């Protein structure tokens, strides 16, 4: 069916645990992207990149099946190979849609930088539900956590990066502070209570609201007793790189500045130099990431996790939540877990006041 004849995608989202019905999934890259580059015949570089490409796609397909088996309609991002860019400016694949978009209420916000790779999905969103504004780092559900009538917005990264994101801004142009004020007032007029923080982290990498009454968090990043009275909070330690499954990261940490890791390639200096030089925009800062808090709820009774953690799974059992494991093998390269590589488009539910 031609794209213009495909049905429109409904848009709604008020809480991260409401029943998920429509969801976007990211996409990786194809080895052919590098076909015209000198490195294409360098096996020390291309063999690992081929492994990342193939296994990333296999994992996305596995996640697609998990969601579809749960009754969720899925949509895959896709980047046209002809728009990849040159060696000096290789577009990052549309790996983490969560970093670019937000669904708040019945509006899909595309106000967080470039949308290359997601156009095939955006075309199917009704115009009355879509707001597009090119502002790097502004609004996404990696930094805005929705809980019915309450929005928890960490705008620290936006404020911190103002100088290099807007180096040529004139006094007549909007500043990040203006944007924060604009959207705060807008959401308040729509019936939300907006709670601000300025830590500068992705919220979905620091805490997760599993269901009403249950939160998994790295540390006391919110005043939970005050803001979530009576809720149980499970605190997890920061990432332990002594874990035997990931301890080899320490062998290459200094070579990559803590940004990425590919198991088995700790001594592959050609690959490390290439990624550090030409693919710096593809990776994040994995040394800071704790994927055990990065989760995607299908509903209040089912949640998708990146791996097994006894403390977390015992917590789920107490709250009658069934975990489903999604092993995203190259999350330490992409710096993204299951919440990052998805974007919920439609969840049942309303603007409930969970603290009435």
Image: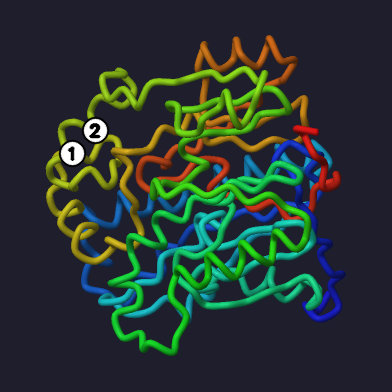
- Determine the residue positioned at 66% across, 29% down: 210
The answer to whether 64 appears left or right of 54 in the picture is right
Whether residue 112 is situated above or below residue 201 in the rendered picture: below
Q: Position of residue 149 (x, y in %)?
A: 75, 46
**Element at badge 1?**
helix
**Pointers 1 and 2 in contact (CB under 8 A)?**
yes
Whether residue 312 is situated above or below residue 99 in the rendered picture: above
Q: Which residue is mark 1?
A: 253
Locate the N terminus by quadrant.
bottom right
Q: Position of residue 215 (x, y in %)?
A: 60, 26
Q: How packed is label 2: few (under 14 Cα within 10 Å), some, or many (20 or more)? A: many
- Determine the residue positioned at 71% across, 28% down: 211
User: 264 or 20, which lies in front?
Assistant: 20
Q: How packed is label 1: few (under 14 Cα within 10 Å), some, or many (20 or more)? A: some
Q: Is residue 67 visible?
A: yes
Give the numbered dot on residue 200. none
Give the quarter of the image for residue 282: bottom left
Q: Position of residue 300 (x, y in %)?
A: 77, 29
- Determine the residue positioned at 51% across, 57% down: 99
The answer to whether 119 appears left or right of 262 in the picture is right
Whether residue 156 is situated above or below residue 210 in the rendered picture: below
User: 286 or 244, which lies in front?
Assistant: 286
**Element at badge 2?**
helix
Q: Is residue 55 visible?
A: no
- Determine the residue positioned at 53% across, 31% down: 306
For the rendered model, the colour scheme is rainbow
Q: CA distance from mark 1 to mark 2?
A: 6 Å
Whether residue 253 is situated above or below residue 13 in the rendered picture: above
Give the numbered dot on residue 249. 2
Q: Position of residue 270 (x, y in %)?
A: 14, 54
Locate the C terminus by quadrant.
top right
């Amino acid at each position: 069916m031609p794209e213009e004849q495909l049905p429109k995608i409904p848009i709604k989202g008020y809480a991260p645990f409401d029943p998920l019905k429509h969801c976007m999934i990211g996409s990786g890259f194809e080895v052919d992207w590098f076909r015209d580059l000198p490195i294409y015949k360098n096996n020390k570089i291309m063999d690992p990149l081929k492994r990342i490409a193939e296994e990333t796609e296999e994992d996305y397909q596995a996640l697609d099946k998990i969601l579809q088996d749960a009754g969720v309609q899925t949509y895959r991002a896709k980047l046209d190979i002809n728009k990849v860019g040159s060696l000096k400016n290789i577009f990052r694949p549309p790996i983490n849609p969560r970093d670019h978009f937000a669904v708040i209420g019945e509006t899909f916000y595309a106000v967080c930088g470039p949308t290359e790779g997601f156009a095939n999905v955006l075309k199917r969103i009704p115009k009355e539900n879509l707001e597009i504004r090119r502002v790097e780092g502004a609004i996404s559900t990696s930094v805005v956590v929705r809980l019915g009538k309450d929005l928890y917005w960490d705008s620290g990264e936006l404020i911190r990066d103002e100088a290099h994101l807007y180096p040529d801004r004139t006094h007549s142009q909007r500043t990040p502070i203006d944007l924060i004020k604009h959207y705060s007032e807008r959401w308040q007029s729509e019936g939300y209570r907006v709670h601000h923080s300025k830590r500068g982290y992705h919220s979905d990498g620091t805490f997760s609201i599993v269901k009403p009454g249950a939160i998994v968090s790295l540390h006391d990043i919110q005043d939970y007793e005050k803001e979530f009275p009576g809720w149980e909070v499970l605190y997890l330690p920061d990432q332990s790189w002594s874990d035997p499954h990931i301890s080899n990261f320490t062998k290459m940490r200094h070579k990559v500045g803590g940004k990425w890791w590919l198991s088995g390639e700790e001594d592959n200096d050609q690959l490390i130099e290439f990624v550090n030089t030409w693919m710096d925009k593809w990776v994040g800062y994995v040394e800071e990431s704790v994927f055990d808090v990065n989760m995607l709820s299908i509903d209040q009774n089912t949640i998708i996790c990146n791996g097994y953690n006894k403390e977390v799974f015992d917590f789920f059992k107490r709250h009658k939540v069934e975990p489903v494991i999604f092993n995203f093998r190259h999350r330490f390269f992409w710096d993204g877990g299951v919440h990052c590589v998805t974007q919920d488009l439609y969840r049942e539910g309303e603007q409930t006041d969970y603290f009435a």
